[in-house]
Amino acid sequence: PSPETTAAVRAPALLGLNALGRLLPEHLTAALADPDPNVRRTALRLMEPLLERGQRLPTELEVLSRDPDGAVRFQLALTLGASGSAAAAVLLDRLLRQAEDDRWMQAAILSSARRSAGRLLRSWLDRQPPDSVAGRALAGALLDTALAGEALSRDATLAAIAVAAAGSGRALRLHLAARALERSPDPETADAGFRNRRLNLFAPLMVQARGLAFDPSAAA
């Protein structure tokens, strides 16, 4: 049979083994390195239950984060949502770096970033992106995702926004600070520790805001 014929059979074979309960991790590991992108995408989808049960990310996923096939990278972004590990966050950040002009890929990354959005936002701000409409939309979506997550993610997000004021992007950081204040827990219902941390994080930004009110050119 031709290589095309065997490739067309390998993806259904994986699905069949999975349906019969005979799919082994080594089958998926081999399929992640398959020359056919459809087989690689299928293997990624079938790996999600293993990741949800806490299996470590296979090293092959790092290679797939640079896969030449965009559909494979898109599926990888979706699959990483099954893992809450730091390694998954690193790969999501790498995919985001490659997709800052790709709204579909950004949507896939955001859907998987519930437990890592604060970290992704910090990394994105550290790259000092331009203060554009698209940039604010992406940063705002990361912020909203983080604020909807766990308390640790909320704190990471607030810390990311309050990163040292020096340098470019002050207007964007202040925009995000205001957005975070709107979406973070009501001070009357939040615990005292969270209220104090929020106050300490936002105090330097409030100084900046007053400065910008008198000198808008300092936003750059």
Image (tube, rainbow, N blue to C red):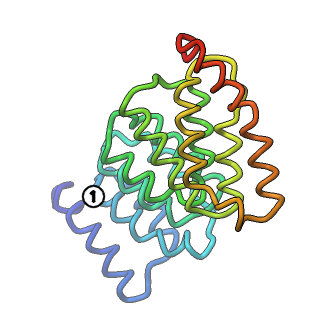
Relative vertical location of residue 9 with respect to residue 153 in this rendering, above or below: below
Q: Position of residue 113 (x, y in %)?
A: 52, 55
Quadrant of the rendering where the C terminus is positioned: top right
Q: Position of residue 75 (x, y in %)?
A: 37, 56
Locate residue 67 relative to residue 205 in the image: left or right.
left
Q: Residue at the spot x=44%, y=79% of the render?
A: 23
Locate residue 20 relative to residue 124 in the image: left or right.
left
Residue beneath disc 1 = 38
Residue 71 versus residue 100: which sits nearer the camera? 100
**Residue flagged by tag 1: what amino acid is it?**
Asn
Q: Residue at the spot x=47%, y=69% of the render?
A: 48
Residue 164 versus residue 210: which sits nearer the camera? 210
Quadrant of the rendering where the N terminus is positioned: bottom left
Would you call the spot at circle 1 few (<14 residues within 10 Å), some (14-19), or many (20 or more)? some
Locate residue 5 relative to residue 193 in the image: left or right.
left
Q: Position of residue 54 (x, y in %)?
A: 63, 71
Provide the secondary structure element on which disc 1 rests: helix
Q: Quadrant of residue 176?
A: top right
